[in-house]
Image: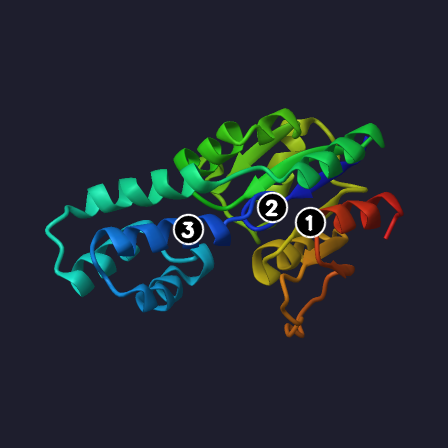
Amino acid sequence: MPLLLLDLDNTLLDRAGPFRAWAEGFLAEIGAPATDIDWLLSIDADGLTDRWDIADAIRDRYALRIPSIDLVEELYDGVVGYTRLDPLVACALRIADDAGWLPVVVTNGSVRLEDAKIRQTGLDRYVADWVISEEAGVSKPNPRIFALAAQRARLPLRGAWVVGDSPEADIGGAAAVGLPSVWLHRGRSWTDTRFAPTRTVDSLIAAVSVVLAGG
């Protein structure tokens, strides 16, 4: 049974949409201009910025007296609250499982946030296991996190595929460990010259189709 190693944010679960929804509601709540959404999205950097740094930036910009820890809590709870599992993603995972593949999530992030999203959306019913960088002590693109996922699944990495939206973390990680990969482009063009995905697609359904067809 081969492994299907899947990224979480903006691959299995939309992360950009829930963050925007939370951000728009938060800005309205504090009376900030709606146009500030562009600033907040840029600060977030598609999830790459640490939550504490975002909280501090918000407090500084709007001179809020809310403790940073409370803003961090709201960031966690708000994003999780808006996150939903797309039925098409659930269907794709079921198809992969029925075809003999073992879906395992490999994600960078905090245990609290990533685990909550996996469980509260019901994604846990469609994957065999998940490895979160904070708990693992190693992050993508380091090959060790993929090796750990294989160890947890008690399966070899040989024959596995990596699917994700991050050029560096997912596709770079796959290249580092010598695995084929599928990149979810999300409207972007590939620009990295150090490595490249095996295939490029626009959805998880398409990614699973590529893997099942052998590339």
Type of amino acid under label 3: Ala
Asked whether disc 3 touches disc 1, contact meaning CB atoms under 8 Å apart, the reply is: no
Dot 2, how many residues are within 10 Å of its Cα: few (below 14), some (14-19), or many (20+)?
Answer: many
Which label was assigned to residue 7? 2
User: In the rendered view, would you say 71 is above or below 175?
Assistant: above
Dividing the picture into quarters, in which one does residue 102 lie? top right
| Residue under numbered circle 1 | 163
The residue depicted at 57 percent of the width and 28 percent of the height is: 122
Q: Which structural element holds mark 3? A: helix
Q: Nearer the viewer, residue 33 or 196?
A: 33
For marks 2 and 3, give the CA distance.
Answer: 22 Å
Residue nearest the viewer, comparing 164 with 149? 164
Q: Quadrant of residue 188?
A: bottom right
Residue drawn at (57%, 43%) of the image: 13
Q: Is residue 99 above or below residue 39?
A: above
Q: Which residue is mark 3?
A: 21
Counting from the top left corner in percent of width and height, residue 55 is at 25, 53
Name the residue nearer the viewer: 197 or 123. Answer: 123
Task: Please report contact status of discs 2 and 1: CB closer than 8 Å, yes or no.
Answer: yes
What amino acid does circle 1 point to? Val
